[in-house]
Image (cartoon, rainbow, N blue to C red):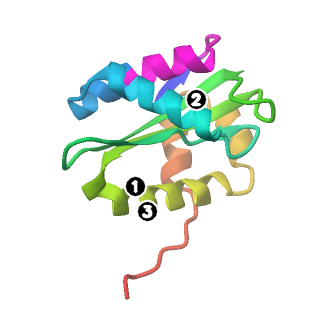
Amino acid sequence: ILDYNINFTMESLFKKISEVMARKLDADSGYIHSQLIEREKVSSTALTPDFAVPHMILKGENKFAIVVVRCRKGVKMSIDATNVHIFFFLAGTMDKRKLHLLSLAAIAQTVNNPGFVDNWLKAKDTRELRRLIVNAKRIRRKDS
């Protein structure tokens, strides 16, 4: 979980997170950055005015990472999402697509918890942010 209190453009945030993800995934940061930007051009990953889930598929096998980010000052993602504070960046290889989809479902449930956005913005540090994510109520179903 990364917590920033500086101004970012979407481009500069994606560049910063691409570097972080590249280290986690042993991948090229330029490739990650270009894929995130291209994905954003096709359709905004901002699901609400406050919340975005930029994600991408990587080449290779057995790689997956989530980088959670709070941008206190907000980032303009689109005309409808001009002040996004909550980011869940996902990247993974095709063999990890089930994990990718399960992560997206868990993220959606977490962010939809009553008061999540307000609590996210008020959290004093990354420890509190982590607690919000871990303690969020989620519907869990057993595989059939």
Left or right: where 73 falls relative to 14: right
Q: Which mark is residue 70?
A: 2
Residue 128 found in image quarter: top right
At 68% from the left edge and 28% from the top edge, which residue is drawn? Answer: 77
Quote the CA–CA distance across marks 1 and 2: 20 Å
Q: Which residues are magenta?
A: 5-18
Which amino acid does the dot numbered 2 rest on? Arg
Residue identifier under label 3: 102
Q: x, y (%) of residue 56?
A: 42, 41
* Residue in the foreground of this view, choosing between 120 and 71: 71
* Residue in the foreground of this view, choosing between 113 and 20: 20
At 51% from the left edge and 31% from the top edge, which residue is drawn? Answer: 38
* Residue in the foreground of this view, choosing between 35 and 118: 35
Mark 1 or 2, closer to the camera: 1
Q: Secondary structure at mark 3?
A: helix
Give the farthest residue toward the right.
Answer: 80
The quadrant of the image that shows the C terminus is bottom left
Which amino acid does the dot numbered 1 rest on? His
Residue identifier under label 1: 100
Q: x, y (%) of residue 102?
A: 43, 62
